[in-house]
Amino acid sequence: MSEASGNDAGNRRWPWPQVSWIVRDLRDTDRTGLRTPDPGPSRVTKRSFAWVAIAVLYALGWGMGILAAVLVLNGAEAPPQASPDRLPSTVASLVVDVFVVTLALVVMRVFRGQKLPREHWRPMLRTVPLTALAMLVGFIGVSLVSAVLSLEKMSYPFPDMNMGLSTILWTLSLLLAGPTEEFVLVGVVATVLRRTGYSWWTVAAVAVVLRIPFHLYYGWGAIGMAVWAVLVAALYRRTGSLLGLAIGHALYNVLTLAGPFAGVGRVALALAGLGLAIHYLASNLQTDRHLPAPSLTSR
């Protein structure tokens, strides 16, 4: 074999230009439109308002949930998520969720200084299964951390699914968890921190700190959900689709209603996301990166 042929074979085996382009693409692409402003005398005040907004929304949305999770960690019995004697509190929880989502939209609008951008349907649809994949990886992380550190892993307190109105309200609660968590823990966090000069690393760190506490009813292994928080923050930066995150989360949750097929449904949705990720990698590895790279903002 000639030296030239050997070099060609090596280039086909190790496509460094393509790999380098993929790394830069994943690192640099930001489709959220959340550009950091120039430093100014008012930035300290704006940052204070940013942290207050995050704290208020977090307390409203998950204050009681964190308290319940801590009690469960200390041996208390987890209350069922829906039951005939908890209808008033379930309705109140739904009202709070709707209020938190509404307030989150207002906060994002204020900090952006303009209307929220209209989402394109293609990035939104791609984001849905990728969100499910991030969630599945997060729950696998919980199991791995619990197993490696020999921690007790607790189960989610699923209610009896034959309770009429209680079941309907619980289903609504599952669906609302999607927009509530993603609009606040990703959308608001990214918006207020980026618009006050913080880096995406800070956004990811805060997303992790906020995502774990109210999931502690799974046990201390819930720290494995850090990977979920980081992945959805990165996914939002990459696609700019909050609706995709919210819908993906809601679908993953509502598949609980599939009973014995819930696990299969979730895995199938996550595998669709894995297929998209593999397609992205395969397509770019086969592209000649010596040519000009495509626009990073193309949809």
Image (cartoon, rainbow, N blue to C red):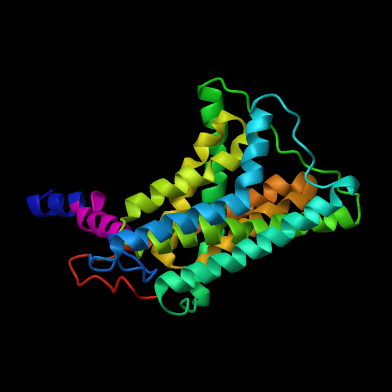
Identity of the residue drawn at 19% across and 71% down: 291
In the rendered image, which quarter is residue 114 located in?
A: bottom left
- In x, y percent, where is residue 122? 50, 74
State whether residue 299 appears in this view.
yes
* Magenta stretch in the rendered image: 11-27
- In x, y percent, where is residue 97? 67, 59
State whether residue 286 appears in this view.
no
Magenta span contains residue 91: no
Most foreground residue, 280 or 147: 147
Q: Main secondary structure of the magenta part?
A: helix
Identity of the residue drawn at 14% across and 49% down: 6
Task: Answer above or below: position of 170 versus 81.
Answer: below
- In x, y percent, where is residue 261? 75, 48
Task: Answer above or below: position of 181 versus 34.
Answer: above
Horizontally, is 55 left or right of 11 in the view?
A: right
- In x, y percent, where is residue 224? 51, 36
Task: Answer above or below: position of 62 versus 36.
Answer: above
Residue furthest to the top in view is 150
In the rendered image, which quarter is residue 4 located in?
A: bottom left
Task: Answer above or below: position of 39 versus 233.
Answer: below
Q: How many marks?
A: 0
Most foreground residue, 164 or 123: 164
Identity of the residue drawn at 51% across and 66% down: 242
Horizontally, is 101 left or right of 210 in the view?
A: right
**On the rendered image, what quadrant is the C terminus found in?**
bottom left
Most foreground residue, 236 or 104: 104
Residue furthest to the left in view is 3
Identity of the residue drawn at 75% across and 60% down: 172
Magenta span contains residue 14: yes
